[in-house]
Amino acid sequence: MSLDTSPRTYRFVQVDILTSGYRVVGKMAVTTHGTMGIMNDPTHSSLELHDARMARLHMPTKLVDHFELVRMMKRQLHAVCMARREDLGPHAIVRGGFTSVTEYTVRLATPMFEIEGTMELPGRFDFTALISEGSREFLPVFNATLTAILIPNFKVESAGMLVNRRLVDIMALVNQRAKPQN
C-alpha cells in the first residue's frame, strides 16, 4: 500500500530488521497500532522500509547500499528491533488485550540468531500455544539482546523486539537453566 493512496495517518518508526543475510536499518510507516500492528497484519505479506541502509551480517559496519525504499517479505524476517518499547504499539495490542501478565525471561534460537529477553504472557508459559496458535506471527520480546550464532561479535540490543515465531527453533526459560554440578 502506498502512503499516497492510504486514508490512514502514518508516522515513521526507526527499525533495525534482521534477515538471514542482512541487517537493514530504516524507517517503517506505522499507524496507531504501531510496529506490532504492521507486522501481525494478516492482510499484507510484505512491508516497505523507507530510507533503508543495508549491511551484510558478517560485515555489519560496512554499508552495502542505501535506498529510498526497500520492500521485504515478512515471513523471511527473523527479527524487527526498536530502540523504544513504545514503538511496538499500544499496551492492549502488545499484550494481546490482557491487563495482567507474567514476565518470563527467555532464550530463543532461530537458524541464524540467539535472542535473550523478557516476554510478557497471560498466565502460565505454554510453548505450543505461543508458537502454533493465534494470529500473531511476530512475538514481542522486551529488553532483548540478539546475537548472530556464527558471528558472536554481532550483537543488537533492543528495548522492544519482534521475533518471527515461524523461525523459532528453540525456546527456553532462563529460570529453568540447569545448575552446574560440582
Image (tube, rainbow, N blue to C red):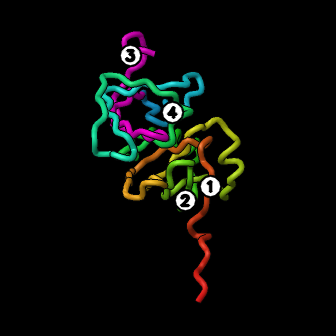
Disc 1 versus disc 3: nearer the observer:
1
Camera-side residue of 101 and 71: 71
Marking on residue 39: 4
Cα–Cα span, label 1 and label 3: 37 Å
- For label 3, the crowd category at 10 Å Cα-Cα, with few meaning under 14, some 14 to 19 and many 20 or more, is few
Circle nearer the N terminus (1, 4)? 4
Amino acid type, mark 2: Arg
**Residue 139's spot in the image, x, y percent?**
55, 44
Circle nearer the N terminus (2, 4)? 4
Range drawn in magenta: 1-30
Look at mark 2 in the image and give the residue it sits on: 107
Amino acid type, mark 4: Met
Cα–Cα span, label 2 and label 3: 37 Å
Cα–Cα span, label 2 and label 4: 21 Å
Quarter of the image where one finds residue 45:
top right
Look at mark 3 in the image and give the residue it sits on: 3
Disc 2 versus disc 3: nearer the observer:
2
- At horizontal 44% and vertical 34% (from top left) the residue drawn is 34
